């Protein structure tokens, strides 16, 4: 029993050294991509919103997506299939749960995140910010809830395409092959 406990806790030591710091140029490309994406979404939202409180295009999970597709474009989580598919599938899961189940918000939230992870695994579209997108579908404002399934198209799909276009443009301006994007489409 002691050995089993010791082995269990030994797993938490870590087995590798921390990665080296990124080159300054890579850091700057990441920052530029994220800046351009968020400013583009903000401008886009500004023209479509009816009031300053209507800025539902700036969903928090897109900030996390920006970290992945601009800061770590080589990861599987960052590839277009995962990025767009993960957000769409997670939004669909969240909207379905909110519309058709009448549990406590706590249960709906847990279901949305856990089922979106399962759905992303089953469809090979794992994108960690998708879990946040599913959660936003549940805990979002009344305006988010009123969108229903339209939430998948706007803002999720529209913003995803804006961010993807900027990722394709910015990541491929670099001469560093580790920034070339994407590694694959499907």
Image (spheres, grey):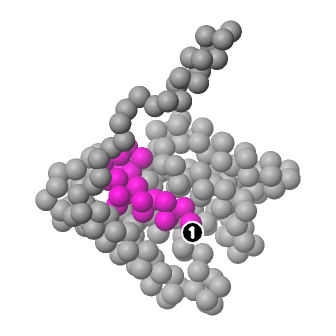
Q: Which residues are magenta?
A: 59-79
Q: Position of residue 146 (x, y in %)?
A: 72, 71
Q: Quadrant of the C terminus?
A: top left
Residue sitting at 49 percent across and 65 percent down? 63
Q: Is residue 87 visible?
A: yes
Residue at the far left: name it: 175
Residue sitting at 47 percent across and 81 percent down? 42
Q: Is residue 51 magenta?
A: no
Residue sitting at 69 percent across and 49 percent down? 112
Around disc 1, counting alpha carbons within 10 Å, would you say few (fewer than 14), some (14 to 19), or many (20 or more)?
Answer: some
Label 1's element? loop
Compared with 54, 78 (above or below) is: above
Q: Is residue 185 visible?
A: no
Compared with 156, 35 (above or below) is: below
Q: Quadrant of the N terminus?
A: top right
Query: Which residue is at the front of the view, 67 or 88?
Result: 67
Q: From the viewer's perspective, is 151 left or right of 74?
A: right
Q: Which residue is mark 1?
A: 59
Q: Give the total of numbered labels.
A: 1
Q: From the viewer's perspective, is 107 left or right of 11?
A: right
Q: Position of residue 116 (x, y in %)?
A: 61, 45
Q: Position of residue 89 (x, y in %)?
A: 56, 50
Asked where in the image residue 155 lies, by quadrant, the reply is bottom right
Asked where in the image residue 23 lies, by quadrant, the reply is bottom left
Q: From the viewer's perspective, is 67 left or right of 117?
A: left
Chief secondary structure of the magenta portion: helix
Compared with 49, 139 (above or below) is: above
């Amino acid at each position: 029993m002691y050995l089993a406990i010791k082995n269990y806790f030994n797993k938490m030591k870590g087995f590798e050294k921390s990665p080296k710091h990124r080159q300054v140029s890579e850091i700057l490309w990441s920052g530029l991509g994220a800046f351009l994406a968020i400013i583009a979404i903000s401008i886009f939202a500004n023209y479509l919103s009816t009031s300053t409180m209507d800025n539902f295009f700036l969903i928090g999970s897109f900030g996390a997506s920006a970290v992945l597709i601009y800061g770590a474009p080589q990861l599987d989580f960052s590839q277009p299939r995962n990025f767009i598919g993960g957000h769409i599938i997670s939004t669909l899961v969240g909207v379905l749960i909110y519309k058709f189940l009448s549990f406590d918000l706590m249960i709906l939230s847990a279901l949305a995140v856990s089922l979106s992870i399962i759905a992303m695994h089953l469809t090979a579209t794992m994108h960690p910010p998708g879990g946040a997108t599913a959660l936003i579908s549940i805990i979002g404002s009344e305006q988010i809830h009123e969108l229903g399934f339209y939430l998948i198209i706007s803002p999720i799909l529209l913003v995803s395409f804006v961010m993807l276009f900027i990722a394709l443009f910015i990541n491929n301006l670099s001469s560093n092959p580790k920034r070339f994007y994407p590694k694959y489409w499907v």
